[in-house]
Image (cartoon, rainbow, N blue to C red):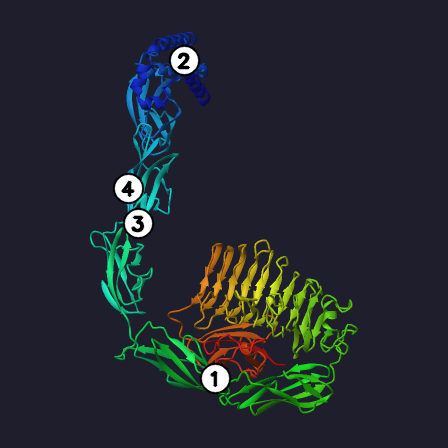
Amino acid sequence: MGGRQSEVEARLSVHHAVPAPEHAAADPEGAGRERVPRRRGQRARHDRILHALRRLMTFKHKLSARLALMKDRVVAVSAVLLAAAVVFACERPVLLTDTGSGTVAQLLVYPKSMTIRTGQTADFMAVALTSAGDTAAAAVTWSATSGSITDTSTKGGRHYGKFKAGSDTGRVKVIARGQATNLADTATVAVTLPPVASMSVSPASASVLPTQTVQLTATTLDSTGAVLTGRTVTWSSSSTGVATVNGSGLVTGVAVGSTTITAASEGRSASSSVTVTTVPVASVTVTPASGSLYVGQTVQLTATPKDSAGNPLTGRVVTWSSDNTTIATVSTSGLVTGKGAGSATITAATGGKSGTSAMAVANVTIASVTVSPAAASLFVGQTVQLAATPKDSAGNPLTGQTIVWSSSDTTIAKVSGSGLVTARGAGSATITAASGGKSGTSTITAAIVPVASVVVSPASASVATGNTVQLTATPKDSAGNTLSGRSITWSSSATTVATVSSSGLVSGVTIGSATITAATGGKSGSSAITVTAPPAPGTHAGWYAAPNGSSSGDGSSGRPWNLATALSGGNGKVQPGDTVWLRGGTYAGQFRSTLTGTAAAPIVVRQYPGERAIIDGAGSTSDTFVADGSYSVFWGFEMTNSDPVRCCSTSSFFRADMMVSHATHVKFINMIVHDGGPGYYTWSPYGDVEIYGAIIYNIGYDGSDRGHGHGMYLKNDVGPLVVRDNILFNSYGYGIHAYTNSGDGLLNGIHLEGNVSFNSGTLSAQGTSGNIGNLGQPPANDMAMIDNMTYFSPGIGGSNWLLGSGDGLTATGNYVVGGSGMSEGTWTNAIITGNTVITSGTKPTQPLVFVRPNAYEPGRAAVIIYNWSRQASVSVDLSSVLGVGRRYEVRNVQDLFGAPLVSGTFGGGTISFPMAGITPPTPVGLSSSPAPVTGPDFNVFLVTTLP
């Protein structure tokens, strides 16, 4: 039956059995009237169908014959009935055929499927057929799974129902069911939403103040103008800097201006014009309304704009002015300064309104100047802060007065413009503070601190014949404090066994023993030196270079090469995986290493254990040491430049770079670099470079424009460039400076971690430089700054840390103290979190200790202490560095070659680190260091172990 039914429906569809549902829903009756001219044609077609039916079926056959022909007849009768339904659906019902008296065998609904919109109607027809295919009279009940259907009429065996779609969308079943039978048929209706044809937004325009809100409402309409509900509306603002809008149409004013708020739904949109305005200023009140001050004094005024109701208005730009700047001036923040005797009116204006304050300025007469303390005693090198207080005739202090300081003898004591006195030589000097024709004085007595003892380190040492060992003498006062600036006289008890230079460098001459003595200020200390035979070959596997080596040597400990020969490959002997040991002493000149190892077997150039190998670039006109071979490691030796003329002794404006990386896959480990031009310089094309554990100080030179020469001058095209656990301090330029000019390399893949940089630029008379700075003209890419530490001593201004700009930054866990803190440029893809920046205001009250164990030398570590409570000593847990029973020494990095501050055998737990101030190391060419003493507020220490 399904096949016959489909055939019937197909034939009926040709004859348009039921009007289109959209047409019917819009105006079913009107649609019927519009089709009146076609009725005669439809009746003629109906008559032809009846005639064909009668020819096909005579109704005189026996029931058996009818049943035999049921297949064709059902199709034919269904076609006739449903085709006739077209006629009756479009005009009044007419008789299709006589209803049969047989048993109802089938119930058909037409149309079988259609699509309409919510709220629309559509007509359906149901016809009952007998087993013989005749139209049968049967009571029919209509139902629908959604929406509603009404039984509209029943004529000639045809049952009509009008379906009305509800608000739900989806597939709906329309069911015709015979009341006296179990027969039923179903049609399917797809119910869809009507499309949005237009929109409106109300209000069409609105005005708000900044931070205030206004609610907009969007209405969606269909093509007839009916309101459509439940549609998704998207809101947007043409200028979010003026006003923003949320997903429900709530508009918030941001700044003065105009913007268009648009609501969009299903391809349609409407808008509202929103204007953000400010509340007009009705008045301006200036407080105090009047005031008096002396010439040179200041008073702070405050302006309060108000609206017409007297409410204060915030966020307004106030312009300050004085009607007589010879009497009183006013800053942009309302700070008034007395300039001359008389009266002046100070005006504050904003929004077209203004307010005033009357200022009376009087000349001040200084009757006296008091200096405190009135007297002070200092040792040479110490300082004291004096304070000068001008007073009137009644003894009242006068503020804002200019003080001029002077010293009667600057060779004994000098005084700064702020009254800070520094003792320079033994004797007495009078410090005078003058103001307004009056003056006060303080008497300063300076004395040289007597030497109570001299400590020589190491107290004993062994040195092979032909080799050297460096001794250090430390004069101390009776309290054990280190004394600087003292002249040391060195001597040997047996010059045939060992000699000593004026700097304490001991040279082994022949096997035996000698006592080396250091004397100053009537006190002395000594070191017992044992001179031994040269170590047998193989004591330390590898090759040897020595200051007295030769190009004709064989690289053994007995016949070492000179350094240039060793760095060029030792006449072809040095192979990947080898170590070249640098014996103690000074290597003068410029050097280039072409040693090239492999990834699995790098070549190592390292200072011989227990000795001090120094490369001195004095007189260099170009780079002092260049690493020009890949897969090479440079470890533990010292770089310096002993030329006392730090810059510009010739027409060049230059001091040679110290360590230069000019190859890929290079490591610099635990180096000591000082008194040169830039400490490290990395060439941008060469990646995979690591600078680890260096101690870098007194770098650079002064120019007329600024301090030049940075502890590290970094750039890299490809990365990685890893700079980790280095200590940098007291330079002329930056500590760490990532920089390159446009077209001269890039700043890619630079990783800074665990470094400490303090008091950078303090050697320069032109002002400080940043401790860490990224300032390249091309922006940096993929830069990491993690767990680094910086410090500027109190009173030092300027930039401490400059993050610069670029794409891809991780800056986390850094600790920044002093100066202007941390500044940031423009970054994309940046993670900047967990950093501590302390510049002013409330500071911590307990010491903060950072311990950085050395990754390459077990038992070695850097200890950084921020001594916020200014304790005399701070306890530090070194259990992560030292094993129990291990011998150790602790030195302040600002006295690296002096006697250890603490030494002993580690018993576990904590060690007390003394926090007294250490005189900074004197830069080559200067008589003393301009850098400030950091203790007890801050110190950095180096922990090492002994065999």
- As drawn, 200 above or below 511: above
Mark closest to the chain's N terminus, 4 or 2 = 2
**Mark 3 and mark 4: span between their CA atoms?**
13 Å
For the N terminus, the quadrant is top left
Which mark is first along the chain, 3 or 2?
2
Q: Secondary structure at mark 4?
A: strand
Say which residue appears at 38% left-offset and 79% top-offset. Answer: 433
Query: Are the two marked residues, 1 and 3, in contact with CB atoms closer than 8 angstroms?
Result: no
Helix, strand, or loop for circle 2?
helix
Q: Is residue 164 visible?
A: yes
Query: Residue type at mark 4?
Result: Ala
* Label 4 neighbour load within 10 Å: few <14, some 14-19, many 20+: some
**What x and y, as percent, mark residue 790?**
49, 69
The reply, left or right, for residue 469 in relation to residue 154 is right
Q: According to the image, label 4 marks what residue?
A: 206
Q: Residue at x 71, y 71 (%)?
A: 579
Mark 3 packing: few (<14 Cα in 10 Å), some, or many (20+)?
Answer: some
Provide residue 586's location: percent of width, then percent of height: 67, 76
Asked whether 169 or 288 is in front, the reply is: 288
* Image marks 3 and 4: residues in contact by CB distance under 8 Å: no
**Amino acid type, label 3:** Pro
Q: Residue lying furthest left in this view? A: 309
Report x, y in % for residue 376: 41, 85
**Label number found at residue 412:** 1
Q: As rendered, which of 204 and 116 lies closer to the eye?
A: 204
Q: Amino acid at mark 1?
A: Ile
Q: Quadrant of the C terminus?
A: bottom right
Q: Disc 2 marks which residue?
A: 63
Alpha-carbon distance for marks 1 and 4? Answer: 77 Å
